Image (spheres, helix red, strand yellow):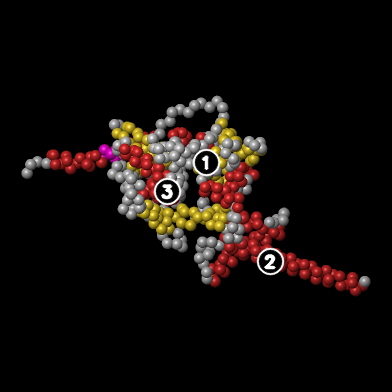
Amino acid sequence: MICAARFAPQLGRALQKRLKNDLNMHKNRIWLGFFVGLFIGLTFGHVLARTNEESKQALTEELLDPLGQLVRQIEEHYVEEVEYAKLLVGAYEGMLSKLDRHSTYIPPEALRQLQVDIEGKFGGLGIKISFDSVKKAVQIEEILPATPASRAGLFPGDLIVEILEESTEQVIKTADFKNVYDAVKELRGKPDTNVTITVLRAESGEREQVTIKRAIITIPGVQVVKVIEQGGRKFGYIKLGYFSRNAAEVLERGIEYLQQENIEGLVLDMRFNPGGLLEMARDCADLFLGGDAVIVSTKSRTGPETTLKASGAVAYEGQPIVVLMNKYSASGSEILGAALHDHHKATLVGETTYGKASVQKIINNPHNRKSAIKLTIAHYYTPSGVSIEKQGIEPDVECKLSEEDTRKLFKYLDSQIKYKPIPWDDEEPEQPGPTDEVTTEPGKEPEEEFTDAQLERALEVLAEAVAEAELKRDAPTAQRTAAPAG
């Protein structure tokens, strides 16, 4: 008993040391798995391009070691037990958010939803949203045309602060969301079901409750084709609101229809066009450009420069074109507008565009293939070699609108959209419009008649261009008539 008592402290210390070693070995295995996953999932792009020992050492010293030290501090001092999987996701999200505004982590549930989006039909409202972690609110980035959201009067910049699910009568505050995918999950649902949202208006800051019926979202690319008569002249007008899969085909038929009506010029309206499929923007540019004209080029950090050139038959030439754009014209619409402008095919009227000139790619996460990352892999450049990222395209003729008038314009244009935009076009199938029903605050006064000041300015510019072209054509004849006999 005396001996046992004498050696008990030493045995206790030995046992503690053994347990500590086992625990450290267990932790080391966890850390190894954590950092292997972190290394595989996050060391892309410039990191993967480095293969020499110096780069590997820099990777360890500048990235992995500091992260490891931070996680150890969290593990030792955080009030609750740490889940490494959550920390890994946090590392993904935080690191990608520091690259640019388009690169992001896509968790498994969001990746499944993205695959639904690619099919082009889903039950929703027709909005593109982001999560403002500072304001703890869901911000509306884009409103797709001819959708329940546009009919409800929602507008880019509005904040969604509450969501009421009709089926459960549960009020969900967006301040409780962790990311944008929590909002997507609540806003989407089966078609013909209602969702009520509370929004903070960007312009006034007022709270407003709006009830919207979800619908199958189908977006028409070419939305309006019509003839406008002004000052004794006939002009064509085409509203190209989105680069959907059949946009170029319908645009070509719209041009053919307008030419049969003997128009003297064309207004191509791409205001509020957020982009869409890059190949459709290229195919639309094909209809106006020829002779291997450069449409757009893309440059990455590691790969070769890629140039897209016109290749199809020109459908519209010889007559002036005015392109209408505003600050919500982005991506594909900027590509098309810049191509027509740089090749002296069109005059740009309106406002400086949004300024999105980057190419994103969805890359599977090798550590967890059920998730992915959306990564900016290249920037695109206009035919003149200019990058418009965060700069936008400045118009030749500026015509700015106030925020209030921009909202009215959006609502007006949305009300004009037709799912069969070309009159008497039997080849264009009738697409079902959204079956949305919108309920807003009662007692509102009816909207006053709207005047599209930007379109009127575009028509003035078009008339001036037609008159100038006529003078040039008539000039040789006039000179011959006035020349004295020799």
* Residue type, mark 2 in image: Asn
Given the current orientation, which residue lies at the most extreme right position? Answer: 1
Q: Earlier in the sequence, mark 2 or mark 1?
A: 2
Alpha-carbon neighbours of circle 2 within 10 Å: few (<14), some, or many (≥20)? few
- Please indicate, yes or no, whether residue 186 appears anywhere in the rendered image: yes
81 on left or right of 262: right
Q: Which mark is residue 28?
A: 2
- At horizontal 51% and vertical 26% (from top left) the residue drawn is 445
SS at circle 2: helix
The Cα–Cα distance between marks 2 and 1, rounded to whole angstroms, is: 50 Å
Q: Which residue is mark 3?
A: 280
Residue 473 is covered by the magenta coloring:
no
The amino acid beneath tag 1 is: Ile
Bounds of the magenta span? 464-468
Q: Residue most toward the front?
A: 426
434 displayed left or right of 337: right
> Residue 430: x, y in percent?
45, 38
Quadrant of the drawing holding the C terminus:
top left
Considering the image in quadrants, where does the N terminus appear?
bottom right
Name the N-terminal-most of marks 2 and 3: 2
Mark earlier in primary sequence (3, 1): 1
